[in-house]
Amino acid sequence: MMMNIQYKLGLAALAALFTTPAAAQDAVGLDDKINQAFADFTGPFVSFIFAPFPGTGFPWIVGWLVVAATVFTLYFAFVQLRFFSHAISLVKGDYSDPNDAGEVSHFQALATALSGTVGLGNIAGVAVAVGIGGPGATFWMIVAGLLGMASKFTECTLGVKYRNEYDDGTVSGGPMYYMSKGFDELGLPGGKILAVLFSIFCILGALGGGNMFQANQAHQQIAGITGDYPGWITGLVFAVIVFAVIVGGLKSIARVTEKVVPFMGVMYVAAALVIILMNADQIGWAFGQIFAGAFTGLGVAGGMVGALIQGFRRAAFSNEAGVGSAAIAHSAVRTKEPITEGFVSLLEPFIDTVVICTMTALVIIITQQLIVDPETGKYMLNEAGNAIATVDGNSGVSLTSAAFGSAFSWFPYVLAIAVILFAFSTMISWSYYGLKAWTYLFGEGHTKELVFKVIFCIFVVIGAAANLGPVIDFSDAAIFAMAVVNVFALYFLMKVVRQELASYSERLKSGEIRKFEH
Amino acid sequence: MTTKIVIGLDGTETGERAIAFAKDLAKLIGTCELVVAYVIEWSPYTFQTPEENAQRHKRREEEVELATSRIVTPAVDALKSAGFDAQGIVRHGDVAETLNAITVEQGGSQIVVGRSSADGIKKRLFGSSTQNLVMHADVPVTVVN
């Protein structure tokens, strides 16, 4: 989920959707007014969520997530290191009972959750981080990714532990369930209130960051290849496909996407590896830049703190650790031990941030997209002075695209397709997260669910068509507001996870939990 | 000791021929139990949407129920009424691996399957389930044409 994106499209596109050309002129004015009114209405909330600590440029929400990740890391004594190889064994199915074959496997739950997080954050977000914070931002991004593993572990364990299993065999889980049921169990008040708050933010986040933003970026990519055209056309096509999948139950499209997305992810990492290996002699230099930049700033705007903020911020935006979304995705797995899903989920920030984001950063650094002043050896700033000057003045997706394109001229096309597919799979994932929050608030039922799904599809069109900066600021803020509520609840519930961890570790040591022969 | 023969069904008529052959074998052996197995092709490494995951348990139950009522139970009932000792098993997994696993678990001495129907490109690339079974099974396998 990113901000700082240039929205090229004018409001005319949105106007065209609803009005005749003759009325468009008035409508533009009207849209401006709506935009302004919305911005005024949501502005205080957005400013509050992204407010910096006094006297710094460091948004407190990023601090909130990093402090939480650090607390969980220490509280669970570096669970992400101690159980890393165990997590891989679980994903491989070493501990899966053959009699449970046919249920959701750990691998499937991980893959589903990953397809919701791997996306624009890894491609565009990293470019923004490195473009502003310099190579040193990569170091802090990796640190944040490693710490975030503990947050995911905590929330996903709770997600499975407190999920609802219905008589018909379906499941619903996520932060709203561990907030209400977990708090009740511990005799704490306010669980329901937190759950309702979380659900509201989750719906807003799903419609915004998980939908409009994705549709908007997908349109930017397509328009970048075909030339500019009205965004509502892209929006409508996407909305029809999304409708077919989530309402029509057209599994084939989802299935194709879910198969192509991991392939794209692997291909992306492979291309990055090839580029890095082609420049093997520079790997040492690149890491030198990353470490030097992490602590000195190498001339970037804001120095070391600038690198740190960018790295932490983009990592948090990319892997969503602490946001609570993954807890919804992971809760479908069939396991007698909720904590095993926690172990599996801690691989997610590792794959998303430590591996994929680092690859992007290395490619940008190694292909020397960032301009160094030959005299001082420091990075030169662009004219505006707010980011590092790049070879063609690129930033965001186009910086990543140019970096890959400098090695493989055809790669920008592949990247564009990847971005579109990532956007689509992220939408499908978030439509589910939003739906779960919706049904938590309004109850399960075909009509109630249909209402949300139709709203979701309408927002796809709006998202692709409009230049709705304030709306997207707001929805990003909503996603982070999810983290405020979620992390707050996690602090109270983490002792439950510690009990699970102690009991599981003991049984693993004693041999009570052991591998199955396959 | 009772000899156990595992019959792998795939819901097609070749399964009928496999049953017929197994019956002949059982008659020759004497004390023999027939285990009718149906494996629902499934891999833990496929990619699914969150919604599919949430409904997976329900779908699994439905799949097992369907395979049991449509294929396995009728076959077991027919065998029993013909005077054979028979039981049925339905499980998810890779067809070849799972049939073999069921056989090992049940202490079966051999597997009888029908020749599987052709399955296009996948078969050309990876071989059919029958071929895999023949190559990797721990017990003798009879493929009925």
Image (spheres, coloured by chain):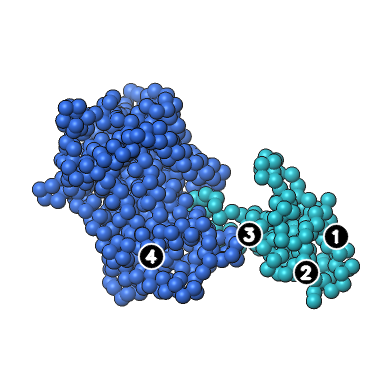
Q: Which residue is painted at 15% across and 40% down in the image?
A: A302
Badge 3: chain ID: B
Relative height, residue A323 to residue A208 (above, below): below
Badge 1: chain ID: B
Q: Is residue A208 left or right of residue B128?
A: left
> What's the mark number on residue B92?
3
The mark tally for this picture is 4
Q: CA distance from mark 1 to mark 3?
A: 25 Å
Q: Is residue A310 left or right of residue A101?
A: left
Residue holding disc 1: B21
Chain B representation colour: cyan
Q: Are marks 2 and 1 on the same chain?
A: yes
Q: Position of residue B128 (x, y in %)?
A: 71, 48
Chain A representation colour: blue
Badge 4: chain ID: A
Closer to us: mark 3 or mark 2? Answer: 2
Q: Are marks 4 and 1 on the same chain?
A: no
| Image quarter of residue A84 | bottom left
Residue A186, visible in the rendered structure: yes
Looking at the rendered structure, the kind of residue marked 4 is: Leu
> What's the mark number on residue A243?
none
Name the quadrant of the C terminus of chain A: bottom right
Residue holding disc 4: A158
Q: Which residue is painted at 70% across and 51% down in the image?
A: B132
Residue holding disc 2: B4
Looking at the rendered structure, the kind of residue marked 3 is: His
